[in-house]
Image (tube, rainbow, N blue to C red):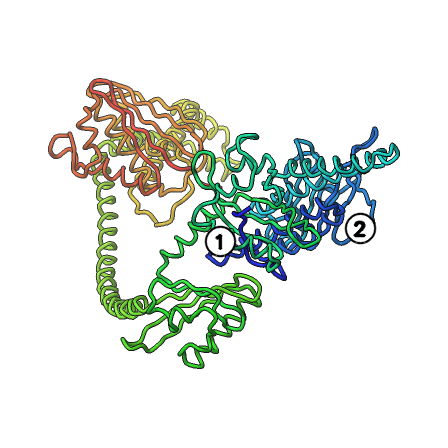
Amino acid sequence: MASLPQGPAPASRAPSGMTTGGESSAEEKLRASHALLRAISEAQADFIQGGEPRELLQRLLTVVLELTGSTSGVIGEVLAGAGGPPSLRLLASFPREEDGTTWELHAPGQEPGEPRALVGAVFSTGAPVLSGGPGARHTFLGLPLECGGERVGVVGLAQRPGGYDTGVIDFLLPFVHACGGLLTGGRQEQRRRRAEQEMRQTQEASAERVRLLAERLRLVMESVQDGLWDLDMITGRLFANRAWLGMLGYAEDELEQTQATWAGLCHPEDAEEAERLVQEHLKGITPLIENQQRLRRKDGGWTWVLTRARVVARDEQGRPLRMVGTNVDITAQKRTEERLRALIRTLPDLVLRQSADGTYLDYHASRAEDLAIPPEQIIGSNMRQTPFPAPLLDKMFMHLGRAIREGTLEVFDYALDLPGGREYFEARILRSGQDEAVSIIRNITDRKQSEVRLLQQEEELRRHRDSLEELVRNRSEKLLKATIELEEQQAQLIQAEKMASLGQMAAGVAHEINNPVSYVMSNLGTLDQYVSSLTPLLQLQRELLSNPGGANAELLERMGELWKQEEVDYLLSDMPELIEESLAGTRRIKEIAQSLRSFAREDTGEPQLVDVNTELASTLKIVWNELKYKCEVKRDFGPLPPVSCHPTQISQVFTNLLVNAAQAIETRGEIRIRTRQEGNEVVVEIADTGKGMTQETISKLFTPFFTTKPRGQGTGLGLSVSYGIIARHKGRIDVQSQPGQGSTFTIRLPSAQR
């Protein structure tokens, strides 16, 4: 078959890193894939020649453990239990178990994380099972083995540093398919052996052995997912399995299966190299044909395949009689490699792959002048041959060794004096495989120069910042002084508004005080007359008491006459009432005076816990004279939590709103005061049946010096000051009004947190 390709000779040790990132990582993955496929191909070829499935599976397991870095693993065949749970018979394991060892897949009492329980989960679900992750102490990967739609076994790997992921699963798919094929082929082989023994008993062993051998070959070739072929080198006849045909889009019997037909499918650019590799193998120069080539599909496109083949039979003169091989579709892998190479080609950096001793294994340079060694000499040369200073070389070797030993990312800067001046470089070194690493060298001269310019700019900015801070400091002091003065003026303005309100109510307050003062004075005049009437009687009583043995009868008679004459009984009954009325009047005067004093005093600066209902009642006493002649006041005070506030300021707000409500009523009306609690807020509603306001008036209502009252009757500050007071108490004040329908002011204040 002229188109069989040849690859590199099998490595003495397959790579175990399976890292990601960079061209070297892609090559590492490719080498690992080649090593795995080569082991699979050899195992399948040995099986065709009569190899023992157990030994072949143990050999494949050892290769997979090395390639993935796992420390243990098993390959088992599922045995259906006779009336009981299924079990797993171990065919290959590491560490090695005794032959014939079985695991019960659903045994009671197993911990969920035990290997046997995880293997049982793989068999039950028919899907891969991953346990643990990066950094976990125990990691596990289980994969089902299937062939012809039947679940025939399980593969389990454990203790891989970094854990398992979908990339590892994709990498192991050829291995899983091969194990399923070998396991199925082994079963067929067992059946074939039993049949062969029966044939020997019937004296037909020779003919049956040939038939079973052909059947075995067909079963194996049809059970695997890879393309398999068997070439008779004498007749040129070739047998290929369905997977081989399907890889190129053909069905069975659509192609003549001859060597010439298959040779015609090879890409013209690959044909010469494929023929050379075949001839070298036929001459015994290479033990195996391994090559990557393109084959034409049925639709006219090209498929990249990895071909591995070798001669398995020669005649007595050493002439090749029979060759077997495999073809694996690597088109997706080739596309990935091309994308990686294209990505690396776009990098402006210098990329070098080096061994631990400093030998350059590969490189990428966007410009030849970036290399310290001519491009044609760099591969195979050593870092010690570069014209770098000795201290710099020692530094590079130190970081290179640490990256390979410890797997760390080494980053360092260095400078070189070049003909064009001093230039700066940044080196990043990361391990890419055993005893080798990738170095990425970037020219950072522009960045260094930018950093210098940035430092200069920062210094200039620092000087400007210091100057600005000094300017801001001076202005802040002036602003603070102005703020203090403004606050003082605001406090004075509030106090002035308060006193203005008090002045407006002075006449009414005087009238309120005048009433109790009038009847107290009247009662005191009456009491003075009562005392004058009782004085003679009390003098006679004093004489009677001072001369108990005298003319008591005459004194008693005179006292009786005076008692009747002055109507002492009436005086004694009327005096308590006069005194009580006078005390009530003085108490009323005292309450009004205390309310005025509380209203007029300045705040202490510290908020207090107050009862809003109490403050409303006190305010009503002050403004009552403004209300009683024009309206009826209806109260609906609900239970309220305390409010943290300045009580005199809150009283001023209530005073302004109540007086405004009374002034809005032209003849006779009603003021409704309602308090309630809503959530964490205390709500006060003051509604009147006055003339109401338009929306234009409402929009200007809280503007300083805006008033609808005639000149001389209002300052225009009452509602503005009230709005500011409520805002400073973290509350809000809302207004609802329509012309002719009255107004409602709603105050909301946050309740105090106990």
* Residue 397 location (% of width, % of height): 50, 74
Across and down, in percent, residue 100 comes to 83, 45
SS type, badge 2: loop
From the viewer's perspective, is 504 left or right of 163?
left
Q: Give whichever of 42, 348 is nearer the camera.
A: 42
- Disc number placed over residue 97 in the picture, else none: 2
- Residue that extends furthest to the bottom in the rendered view of this protein: 390
**Is residue 184 in view from this perspective?**
no
Residue at 42% in and 29% down = 678
Give the residue furthest to the left.
711
Q: Position of residue 467 (x, y in %)?
A: 23, 67
Residue 703 in which image quadrant = top left
Give the total of numbered labels. 2
Residue 482: quarter of image? bottom left
SS class, disc 1: helix
Which amino acid, mark 2? Glu
